[in-house]
Image (cartoon, rainbow, N blue to C red):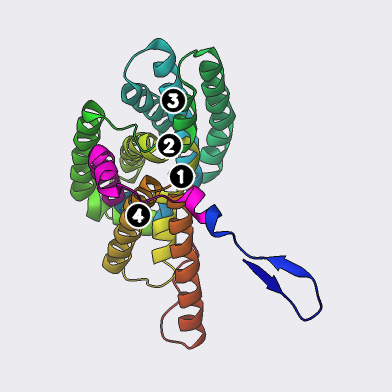
Amino acid sequence: MLLVSAAGPVLRAADPSTFHQIFDFTDYGQVLSLVRNSVIAGAILGVVAGLISVFVMRRDLPFAVHGISELSFAGAAAALLLGVNVVVGSLAGSMLAALAIGALGVRARDRNSVIGVLMPFGLGLGVLFLSLYKGRGANKFGLLTGQIVAIDSPQLSWLIGISIVVIAALLLLWRPLTFASVDPEVAAARGVPVRLLAPVFMIVLGLTVAMSVQIVGALLVLSIVVTPAAAAMRVTATPWLTTVLSVLFAFVSVVGGILLALGSTLPISPYITTISFSFYVLCRAIGAVRERRGWIRRPRAA
């Protein structure tokens, strides 16, 4: 389709064939049935990531998420090279990073230094292991950016088991963790074990990141573990509503990304990150308008 302007230059609009090269929803129902495990895993991950995202933002830990994901990637790459379960390798890397950050980085300055050291180390190890791996190239790429058909029945069982542990831990720790996240000094004065909660939460966060790497890849974990709560906090300061919106945003981002990727030739990651980022932009615009008109109290910066 050609559009001719009054000045004469000819502009070529989007070619419809380009759309069909990217999207093809022929036999969509049959394709959907083949990746049922991925859709179920994505739905579970959306709920878990949305819940923990709230605490990641309250405790100012987005950088830690990125650091843990790099070590999780290294563990998964090592497992791929050794021919063992990738989920187990991803979990081992996440736990190692979470324990190191929790033990060595109690203060924010120390924590950022530890993460800054761990990130390039983990990424370098992962690249080394993938370079030595002689198997399918899709397996290498999937560890970094995720792949929609990666979830088989054993991996789904792992993800369900980890999710149960994470949700149970969050429900058990919800009140003291919220108190310690909002005002750690007052919480400590009231007898809340703030120093103990820090490494415990890092372990729970490590489990969630290990799950996320299986779906969206190590490089894009932030889009579902950080962005949902960051978006929700732009439109509300109410704790329960922030949690509900965060879970909703994460769920729609992951499941919506999977459903779009099924009818596309592109990887899953661009869809998940685009949906997640769209929520953030929309919430930031709504929050700015409401704040300007004095309709809400400004939430903490996200």
Where disc 3 sits, the SS reads helix
Which amino acid lies under the numbered mark 2 shown in the image of this protein?
Gly
Residue interval drawn in magenta: 19-47
Question: Which quadrant of the structure image shows residue 90?
Answer: top left
Q: Residue at x 27, y 44 (%)?
A: 32
Identify the amino acid type marked 4. Answer: Gly
The percent coordinates of residue 35 (x first, y second) are 27, 39
Above or below 216: residue 233: below
Q: Is residue 57 magenta?
A: no
Residues tagged 3 and 1 counted as in contact (Cβ below 8 A): no
| Residue 256 image label | 4
Ranked by sequence position, the earlier of labels 4 and 3 is 3
Circle 4 Cα neighbour tier, 10 Å, few/some/many (<14 / 14–19 / ≥20): some
> Does the image show residue 104?
no
Look at the numbered discs 1 and 2 and tell me whether their residues touch, using CB distance below 8 Å: yes
The Cα–Cα distance between marks 4 and 3, rounded to whole angstroms, is 23 Å
Q: Which mark is residue 152?
A: none
Estimate the spatial distance between the alpha carbons at disc 3 and disc 1, rounded to whole Å.
Answer: 15 Å
Residue 202 appears in which quarter of the rendering?
top left
How crowded pointer 1 is (Cα within 10 Å; few <14, some 14-19, many 20+) is rated as: many
Q: Which mark is residue 146?
A: 2
The kind of secondary structure element at disc 4 is: helix
Q: Is residue 66 above or below residue 244?
A: above
Instruction: Identify the disc placed on residue 139.
Output: 3
Q: Earlier in the sequence, mark 1 or mark 4?
A: 4
